[in-house]
Image: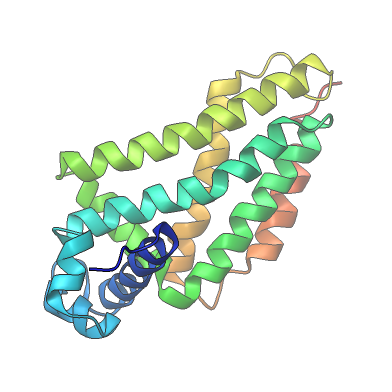
Amino acid sequence: MPKVSPEHSEARRLQIIDAAYRCFARKGFHQATMRDIYEEAQLSPGAIYHYFRSKDDIIKASFEHDFARSLDVFQAALGQTDALAALEGLFEFLFAGLAQAAELGASRVNVQSWGEALLNPDILAAILRVFSGYRASVAQLIRQAQESGKVSPQIDPEAAARVMHALYLGLELQMAWEPEAVDPEQYLSVVKALLRGSFTAG
């Protein structure tokens, strides 16, 4: 049997995740079946189950994939000399990602996943692990901005990171509710104004 390359495996996993997201967006997480997913992906049942045992596994993998592809961006932000500008750049990256993912109905699926996580400890653990990684990087950026005098020292970095996370999640929720009514670019301009306003030192 020929050996499958890591690149091929990763491409196949993403193919399955994308197909699952389209199914979940159309039918809902509980109503969509694994059969729906392998038909949407145009793969055999064996090909699907080789990579994922269940719908839960697919949801967990989607959050972990998004986090993995964001690591380089967050590391680059931590290496910038202007931490406040780096925060703005992170929001640009994250909001652009939301707009691109809208084609898959990802906001609808992610909001469903948040609700599922309240009852499913495995999904909750995966989401919290990913989200805590995001917040830790943002909190570190805020500390760096405080050290350089860009951000008020009276602001708690961890609390600020949670507020910024809430801005992101709030946008995703609104995009799920009203996909045609929410403009991520306008939302981003308001977030930047907040960062450059009372958030800054002085």
Residue at the spot x=57%, y=68% of the render?
A: 99
Which quadrant is the N terminus positioned in? bottom left
Q: Is residue 87 above or below residue 154?
A: below
Residue at the spot x=48%, y=46% of the render?
A: 68
- The percent coordinates of residue 116 (x first, y second) are 21, 52
Report the residue that reaches farthest toward the front: 1
Residue at the spot x=77%, y=31% of the render?
A: 83
Specify how the rendered protein is coloured.
Answer: rainbow
Name the one closer to the observer, 77 or 179: 77
Q: Is residue 165 above or below residue 141?
A: below
- The percent coordinates of residue 97 (x first, y second) are 57, 61
Picture quadrant of residue 126: top left
Q: How many numbered dots are placed on residues in this image?
A: 0
Q: Is residue 33 visible?
A: no
Side of 74 where 198 appears, left or right: right
Which quadrant is the C terminus positioned in? top right
Side of 93 where 151 appears, left or right: right
Q: Is residue 113 above or below residue 148?
A: below
Q: Is residue 172 above or below residue 141?
A: below
Residue at the spot x=31%, y=63% of the render?
A: 3
- The percent coordinates of residue 186 (x first, y second) are 70, 63
Q: Is residue 119 visible?
A: yes
Name the one closer to the observer, 196 or 3: 3
Picture quadrant of residue 46: bottom left
- The percent coordinates of residue 129 (x first, y second) are 36, 34
Name the one closer to the observer, 194 or 145: 145
